[in-house]
Amino acid sequence: MALADTERGVSNCSDSGSPFSEIIELNVGGQVYVTRHKTLIAVPDSLLWNMFSKKSPKELARDSKGRFFLDRDGFLFRYILDYLRDLNLVLPDYFPEKSRLQREADFFQLQDLAKRLNPRMSKDNSISEEICQSDTEDGAQQCGPSGAMETLRTMSSSGAMRSPSLDSRRSGYITVGYRGSYTIGRDIQTDAKFRRVARITVCGKTSLAKEVFGETLNESRDPDRPPERYTSRYYLKYNFLEQAFDKLTEVGFHMVACSSTGTCAYNSNDPNEDKIWTSYTEYVFCRE
């Protein structure tokens, strides 16, 4: 195996004499990536090039497991890394995060990528098939030169675009799920102590979930879901139900149903040990 690795050119140290190993582990906003050192320095004068060629490993932030840490959008970094591999990028057919990806490209000082993601860039230089594809929640309408003119004519005849407030009032249901576990001591008077608060899950139509929760919605488990499709894999970046309820109330949702289940178990086979209670609750919200 060692011989095979040598023949493939894989080693623990960078060939250029860099203090960095050839294989780099990154923690980007909680998402873990593993890539080659030469990939990270593929674009001279970029932020990653400066970090991994001009600095030493000791100068860079690390997480608790020793991985280099970047406090950026972990989901969108996958596209940054794809671009660095061959200086090309192919986006999914439905990709509503183009403006946010452009912001990430600007942060990482990838000027060429940022220019290509600019919606004003000409079609010939675009990295996607249709540079005018909408970055809004609907994301379905595409515009070429003739399409843009037709849109302007429609706007002129109607006097104004459709009000965003009307779009935001679409009816639908959102289900918020909450799982937690806590321990009750042997002394019946002992207060229940929460030992784990898990994620608040969000189920429903993608466009409604994004409208309500915005940046607090973690989409990494279902990243490319079209806006009119349904998902049960989103969750929130905080663990307070009241925050979720406030968000829903602010945009006109109200609770119509809820249900809860619970189980009880012991830490061990000893019945004298503390009991662990696990509960799961779902709250159904509706906007008509």
Image: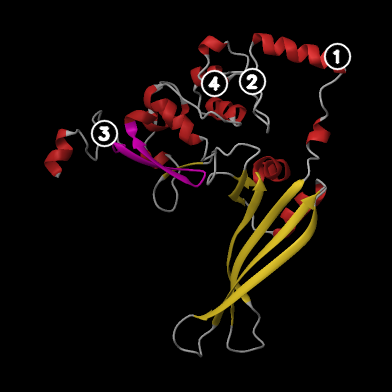
The amino acid at mark 2 is Gln
Residue found at x 23% / y 30%: 15
The numbered disc on residue 165 is none
Give the magenta-colored segment's residue range.
20-37
The numbered disc on residue 14 is 3
Q: Is residue 212 magenta-colored?
A: no
Q: Is residue 50 visible?
A: no
Q: Earlier in the sequence, mark 4 or mark 2?
A: 4
Question: CA gap, disc 1 to disc 3?
Answer: 63 Å
Label pair 1/2, CB-CB below 8 angstroms: no
- Discs 1/4, front: 1
- Report helix, strand or loop for mark 3: loop
**Who is closer to the viewer here, 275 or 257?**
257
Q: Earlier in the sequence, mark 3 or mark 4?
A: 3
Q: Which residue is mark 4?
A: 114
The amino acid at mark 1 is Ser
The amino acid at mark 4 is Ala
- Report helix, strand or loop for mark 2: loop
Residue found at x 35% / y 39%: 24
The numbered disc on residue 157 is 1
Q: Earlier in the sequence, mark 1 or mark 3?
A: 3
Against 145, is 69 above or below?
below
- Pinpoint residue 239: horizontal percent, then vertical percent: 64, 58
